[in-house]
Image (cartoon, helix red, strand yellow):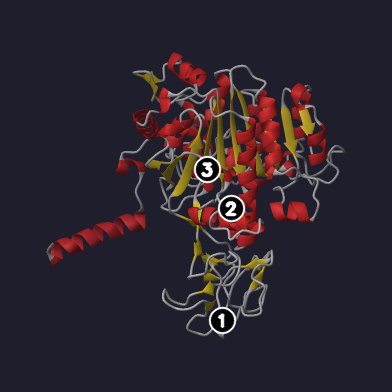
Amino acid sequence: MTKTSSRIVLAFAALLGSQGLSAADTGESAERWFREGAQRADRLGSGQAKAKNVILFVGDGMSLTTVAAARIREGQLRQQPGEENLLSFERFPNTAFSKTYNTDSQTPDSAGTMTAMITGVKTRMGFLGVGQIPERGDCDGGRTQPVASALTLAKQAGLATGVVTTTRITHATPGATYAHVTERNWESDADLPSALRGGACKDIARQLLDYARGTGIDVVLGGGLNKFLPAAKSDPRYPNARGARMDGRNLMAEWRKAQPKTAFVSTGSELAALDLGKTGKLVGLFNGDHLSYEYDRVADKEDEPSLAEMTRAAINVLKRGDKGFVLVVEGGRIDHAHHSGNAYRALHDTIAFSDAIRAADELTSADDTLILVTADHAHTMSFVGYPQRGNPILGKVFGKAGEDEPPSLVKDLLGKPYTTLVYANGPGYAGESSLQPAGTKNFPHNPGGYFEPATGRPDLTEVDTEHPNFMQEALVPTNSETHGGDDVGIWARGPGAQAVRGTLEQNTIFHLLTQPQPVLRAYLCGAGYCEDGVPSRLPKAM
């Protein structure tokens, strides 16, 4: 290549890097994403199986490093070395990689990634159930360019549906199953720009109420109660909740009135007391905000159900349907712990996520139920050093300073030890922050700024790096640790799992879920969305 041509290539690359690629530049469209994903799944043989029930598990932020570290942590909690352990879903027979980028970002967010998985259409950061054409925050785009979710299509086909999460039910991942909005943060009307309040622009909580009353959903379990309650007046059914709504509406009261036969619960005790064999529909919001991290739920004896308990409840309600069901389960707080630079809670929530998958595996049969496990995106946590076999995964590196060195407490070139798990960026940066002094940081830590460390890295020799509140060091100081842009795993068992192989665009997951379900497939073909028997035409969102 000549110097001139090299300069042209570099200039073109710089132009793309500074301005990004538009949908017009790439020829991308919602229809194209959907069609190509359908064709890829069909070539893999997704439609050759028949799955009565379909369960999608999403470990939010569950990078491959997170899976490896959680596997070891679980084993070590059982007094094993840890490396030989497998999380429940790692025993599933079929695996693949998922490419997670959004249409406008190499490193994605949960809104765009979940929209890809649940609608078959890749889209922008921040978008829930909307194609990539509108601008972020364009209210009209959410109404005029929606894309249908697998739950919506399943309900229209006559299947039972449900969504379970440890986050607010209006948060990005669960929100993508029912909402159509170009700003993921519009969870209640208080989150809308003042100019949009009271108009046609619906917040996500209001969309869920309308969805439940219209399309319908059979099980809703998670947090986020405050987004449904008025700020000005309390609801005696939820004495500890502090409403956030500015429109004065009590969406929970409206929901109860619209569906008097639905079982509404707000504590783990109430959920445990239900006769699920006689429960037709179930709504449980167990916290005003997100549910507690698994470690805190147990340590603080919170009256909240575990993710496994919610999963069991959902399956026991949904399996009463004759035609089958589609269920989405999110382990959402893995992501939040990573953003906070706290590997302890991230790993424990990953183990709880694995427990929920084990519960689903035990309650269903691989003969008629497809279980697909994946993550929406990765994180920047890294697994470093040469720790010896069985070294505490949350501990300091005790092992070999080099591949040929004898085991010892490994130290860096400054003579200081370091931990096996670290973050590339985040609030665990060692410099003095606006909230904590220089050195190691304690969870929670949400700083407004940092100063360069005067003495370099902190000395961890006497620091308990396995404490639940220890925050792993971060190379780059940021208020919140970021997502990672690397691929994530897919694990599957049951009818249709044989199609889970190779490296897939993330939106292909939608088709891996829907093509094996005969009732849903027949509905889509009957509605005119099939070509040669394959549902490859983008369905209309109703």
Answer with left or right where residue 464 lies relative to residue 231. Answer: left
Amino acid type indicated by mark 3: Arg
Of the two numbered discs 3 and 2 on the same chain, state the one appearing first in sequence: 3
Total labels: the figure holds 3
| Quadrant of res 465 | bottom right
| Quadrant of res 54 | top right
Amino acid type indicated by mark 2: Asp
Say whether residue 17 is visible: yes
Q: Residue at x 58, y 76 (%)?
A: 430
As drawn, 34 above or below 436: above
As drawn, 486 above or below 278: below
Would you name the residue on which mark 3 appears? Answer: 91
- Residue 169 at x, y percent in the picture: 66, 40
Q: Residue at x 75, y 45 (%)?
A: 287
Whether the residues at callouts 1 and 2 have beta carbons within 8 Å, the answer is no
Answer with left or right where residue 519 lies relative to residue 337. Answer: left
Of the two numbered discs 1 and 2 on the same chain, state the one appearing first in sequence: 2
165 or 242, nearer to the observer: 165
Q: Secondary structure at mark 3?
A: helix
Q: Residue at x 58, y 28 (%)?
A: 365
Q: Nearer the viewer, mark 1 or mark 3?
A: 3
Label 2 environment density (alpha carbons within 10 Å; few <14, some 14–19, many ≥20): many
Would you name the residue on which mark 2 appears? Answer: 335
How far is mark 3 from mark 2, CA to CA?
23 Å
Q: Nearer the viewer, mark 3 or mark 2?
A: 3
Amino acid type indicated by mark 1: Pro
Whether the residues at callouts 3 and 2 have beta carbons within 8 Å, the answer is no
526 or 64, nearer to the observer: 64
State the residue lying farthest toward the top: 526
- Residue 73 at x, y percent in the picture: 61, 58
Would you name the residue on which mark 1 appears? Answer: 453
Q: Nearer the viewer, mark 1 or mark 2?
A: 2
